[in-house]
C-alpha cells in the first residue's frame, strides 16, 4: 500500500472517530435537555398539585374552586412548560439526527476537498 493511500485511510479513520465523538456529544446534550424537561415537568406537576390541595382546603363552605386566581400559576407556568417542551422536541422533528449527521459529513467533506486544493 502506497504512502498516500495509507494517509488517506488514516484520515478517514480519524474523521470517523471525530464524527463519532461529535455525535456522542450531540446525543449527550440532547439527553441533558430531555432530562431537564422531565425534571421541570415533574416539579410543575408536584407544585401545582400542592397549590390545588391548599386552595381546596382554604375554600369556604359552598365556595367554588373555579376562580381565575386559582389558575394563575397553573396557566403561566403551563405556558413555560409548553415553551420548554417545544425547545426540546420540535427541533428533533424538523432537523433529526440523520439530517444533522448528513450535514456534518457534508461540511467535513467540503473541508477535506478545500484542504486538498490548498
Image: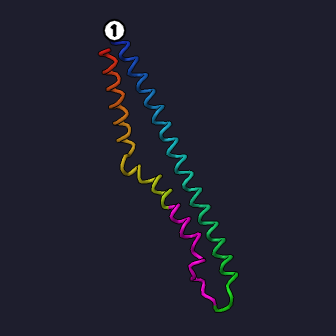
Q: Nearer the viewer, residue 49 or 83?
A: 83
Is 48 left, or right, of 6 in this rendering?
A: right
Q: Residue at x 39, y 19 (%)?
A: 11
Q: Residue at x 64, y 66 (%)?
A: 47
Q: Give the colour scheme shown.
A: rainbow
Magenta-drawn stretch contains 54: no
Is 16 left, or right, of 53 in this rendering?
A: left
Residue 1, position as x, y percentages in the image: 33, 9
Which quadrant of the structure image shows residue 37?
A: bottom right
Asked which secondary structure carries label 1, the reply is loop
Q: Nearer the viewer, residue 39 or 3?
A: 39
| Pointer 1 residue | 1
Which quadrant of the structure image shows residue 61?
A: bottom right
Q: In which quadrant is the C terminus drawn? A: top left
Residue 54, position as x, y percentages in the image: 68, 76
Q: Residue at x 57, y 83 (%)?
A: 66
Magenta-drawn stretch contains 79: yes
Q: Is residue 32 above or below residue 9?
A: below
**How many discs appear?**
1
Residue 53, position as x, y percentages in the image: 66, 76
Q: Residue at x 65, y 72 (%)?
A: 51
Q: Which residues are magenta?
A: 63-81
Residue 78, position as x, y percentages in the image: 53, 66
Q: Residue furthest bottom?
A: 62
The kind of secondary structure the magenta stretch mainly shows is helix
Which quadrant of the structure image shows residue 113?
A: top left
Amino acid at each position: 500500500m502506497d504512502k498516500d493511500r495509507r494517509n488517506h485511510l488514516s484520515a478517514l479513520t480519524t474523521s470517523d472517530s471525530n464524527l463519532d465523538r461529535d455525535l456522542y456529544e450531540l446525543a449527550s446534550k440532547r439527553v441533558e435537555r430531555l432530562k431537564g424537561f422531565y425534571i421541570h415537568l415533574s416539579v410543575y406537576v408536584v407544585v401545582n398539585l400542592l397549590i390545588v390541595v391548599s386552595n381546596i382546603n382554604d375554600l369556604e363552605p359552598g365556595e367554588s374552586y373555579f376562580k381565575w386566581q386559582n389558575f394563575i400559576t397553573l396557566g403561566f407556568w403551563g405556558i413555560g412548560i409548553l415553551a420548554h417542551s417545544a425547545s426540546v422536541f420540535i427541533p428533533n422533528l424538523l432537523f433529526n439526527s440523520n439530517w444533522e449527521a448528513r450535514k456534518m459529513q457534508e461540511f467535513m467533506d467540503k473541508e477535506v476537498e478545500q484542504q486538498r486544493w490548498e
